[in-house]
Image: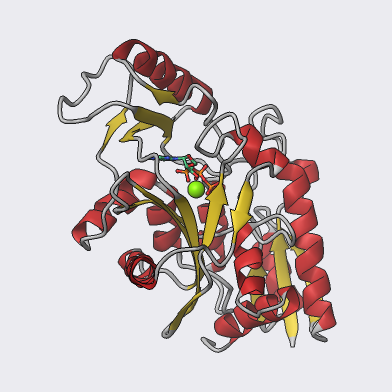
Amino acid sequence: MRVGLVYTDTNKNTRNISIDPHGTKQMNKTVEAIKLALENKNYEVIMIPADIDMLTRIKNANVDVIFNACTGIRTKKEQANVVGMLELLDIPFVGSSLSSHIFGLHKEISKVLFRKMGIPTPNSQLFYNADMKLDGNLRFPLIVKPEHEGSSLGIDEKSVVYNEKTLYEKVREVINTFNQPALVEEYVGGREFTIGIIGDKELKVFEILEVIYSKMETNFMTVSIKAKDAAGFECPANIDEELELKLKDYAKKAFRALELRDYARVDVRLDKFNNPFFIEINTLPGLEPGYSDFPKMAEKSGISYDDLIEELTLLAYNRR
Ligand SMILES: Nc1ncnc2c1ncn2[C@@H]1O[C@H](COP(=O)(O)OP(=O)(O)OP(=O)(O)O)[C@@H](O)[C@H]1O
Ligand SMILES: [Mg+2]
């Protein structure tokens, strides 16, 4: 089988490196690892840098299936543009459709869909500018984050705010730096978990991973903790069966709510009464071995990296 591996050519990546210092390295390592995994499984791999000419290149390469590892060309949002282009071909590709990526990229849209499906998510308000009035129903502490970023970009020690003054400072900073609305959410400060799902018609949920913040400067994932991979983790998470079943059930509902395909990673936190609140769903979760949560959870569920990459490839191939 010939697999086209679509990836971000980081030489062309014009994104301001200070906004995402870790991203380039992570992208390159991930693509190398996927290529190697596919070759270990005896697939022929054709490398396809994602750009505006890629459709012609893919057609000429005569591939059977596409593994899309492009997390955006210049911005994260462009991961959807790439998927939109791939949909124009008659070749199956790994991962969700364009509309599902858009639902997932926009945290506020995901939250609307979560609420419709009865999936609990923190109360929130979207700020298009820093002159908007704070919704009186929201209770401090609040967390301020960019509406459509990932890898904890825009989240630092000052992102959790306790009064209106610091709230508006952060809202202004996020809007100006990321050129997008700021999402203000009630801060849910209990245990944090992430949940990996794989499948298409049938869904499989991996062992749940708990993020551990002991000895950290914050109790939430800042961009620097994330980039340094400084937080601890426990997988399988030490939780009782009732909570485990509840989290897995909601995670699958979230996957269906966004009409996802093949794989995704859902982030969730508990409040002080151990009620879960779903924060977001990653439609193109990181796949860097030894770093990203998704392959860690797969491994703890008995699926090696090579097997994981093959399983994802076959999920797409079987749709042809
Ligand atoms: N409402 C919230 N309550 C508590 N913590 C939150 C909340 N929203 C975000 N966080 C914290 O901030 C981190 C990053 O938030 P979020 O997952 O929304 O951003 P992201 O950058 O898209 O993440 P990823 O790295 O998973 O792509 C979370 O892992 C969590 O620690
Ligand atoms: Mg997250």
The percent coordinates of residue 245 (x first, y second) are 36, 72
Which residue is located at x 60 percent, y 76 percent? 301
- Front residue of this view, candidates 108 and 320: 108
- Front residue of this view, candidates 288 and 75: 288
From what the image shows, is residue 48 above or below residue 165?
below
Which residue is located at x 65 percent, y 47 percent? 73
| Quadrant (top left, top right, bottom left, bottom right) of the N terminus | bottom right
The percent coordinates of residue 137 (x first, y second) are 15, 30
Which residue is located at x 22 percent, y 55 percent? 115
Instruction: Report whether 151 appears left or right of 131.
Output: right
Visible in this render: residue 284?
A: yes
- Front residue of this view, candidates 123 and 4: 123
Visible in this render: residue 47?
A: no
Which residue is located at x 68 percent, y 75 percent? 309
- Front residue of this view, candidates 99 and 242: 242
The percent coordinates of residue 124 (x first, y second) are 27, 37
